[in-house]
Amino acid sequence: MKKDILRAANYGYNFDRQIYFNRNAKKAFSLEFVDDHSEEELVRHIAENTGGNGWIFYFRSTPSEGVRRELERVLG
Amino acid sequence: MPERTIEDRLRGEYFDYLPEIRRVARQIETQVRYLTLPTSQSLAHYEQLIVESRIKDCESAVKSLRQRQEGGTFDPERPDDYSVLSLPDLAGVRVLVFPRGRLDEVDHALRTSFPDWASDPVLSRGETVLARTYSGYCLDVSGKVRAEYQVVPMLIGLFWKVEHEAIYKPPLLKGKADSEPMQMLRKDVEDVLLRFETEFESLIRDSA
């Protein structure tokens, strides 16, 4: 299951924002994105090397700068 | 003076429409009570039917709207995209029925009067319909404020009510009570309550 894949990769779930996130990897997946993609695609995105300099948001619709700023504030 | 946030603007909109929301709640509650009257008057001694109405409070409305956005976040660059009027349940009625044998009858009685309302059932873990949920407009009263009615097995509905008051309302638990273990336990409780009703109905059938 996708949830198990994310949990095994140390992704927590923020119920208020409805996103899976990993502070070390600085990646966040929206529920909609997870629903839209296969387990294989999810594994590939989890493994992607993003440099870790800033948060990467895997969303169905690209989040605006304002949304990114707010989520970065919430995720810390 | 600081700029109004999207949340502040939505709170303002909510209170502008509150009188209309109240009128819609009264209208839908009255209609539902009238339409379920024949069932209420023919209940066996062990059967129950309760009609409850509620108005979504301001903060719940704002939060609910925010959580409908991807990432649970309003886009500050598009403040005009959001309106509390897009919520389907600003005014709501819940019909609690015990046991489940009467659900179809109540659902049918209401559906015939609200045939165009959109259906959005609440499902259990096993994809069983827990609550039959419909939303639409009471056009006699408002073409802007949508209302919702739910037909729910009473045990499930009462559990939701207690859970909501205990877990979601207290500021102390804000953001903490919706954890994964609590979500799993909620599903467990719903499963057990459904099984209880199934067994109860089987006892009633066997003793008839």
Image (spheres, rainbow, N blue to C red):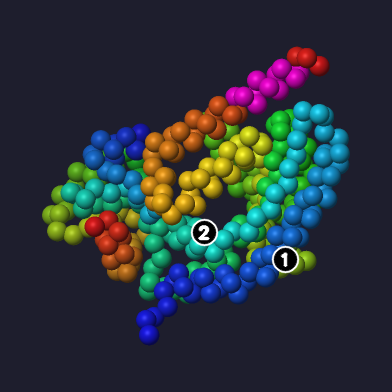
Which region shows up in magenta?
Answer: B195-205
Picture quadrant where residue B100 is located: top right
Q: Is residue B49 magenta?
A: no
Q: Is residue B103 visible?
A: no
Residue picked out by circle 1:
B23
Residue drawn at (43%, 38%), measured in percent from left and top?
B182
Which comes before the other along the chain, label 1 or label 2? Answer: 1
Q: Is residue B197 magenta?
A: yes
Instruction: Classify 10 Å Cα crowding around label 1: few (below 14), some (14-19), many (20 and above).
Output: some
Q: Give the main secondary structure, helix, strand or loop, of the magenta stretch.
A: helix
**The residue tagged with tag 1: helix, strand or loop?**
helix
Badge 1 sits on which subunit? B
User: Does the CB distance between marks 1 and 2 fall below 8 Å?
Assistant: no
In the picture, the quarter occupied by the C terminus of chain B is: top right
> Which residue sits furthest bottom?
B1
State left or right for residue B63 relative to residue B206: left
State left or right for residue A48 relative to residue B42: left
Give the amino acid type for the residue marked by disc 1 in the picture.
Answer: Arg
Q: Measuring from the top left, give residue B185's x and y in whole percent.
A: 46, 33
Whether labels 1 and 2 share one chain:
yes
Residue drawn at (45%, 69%), measured in percent from left and top?
B7
Residue picked out by circle 2:
B60
Q: Measuring from the top left, give residue B197's x and y in whole percent.
A: 65, 26
Picture quadrant where residue B156 is located: top right
Q: Is residue B122 above or below residue B148?
A: above
Picture quadrant where residue A62 is located: bottom left
Q: Measuring from the top left, give residue B176's x and y in whole percent.
A: 38, 47
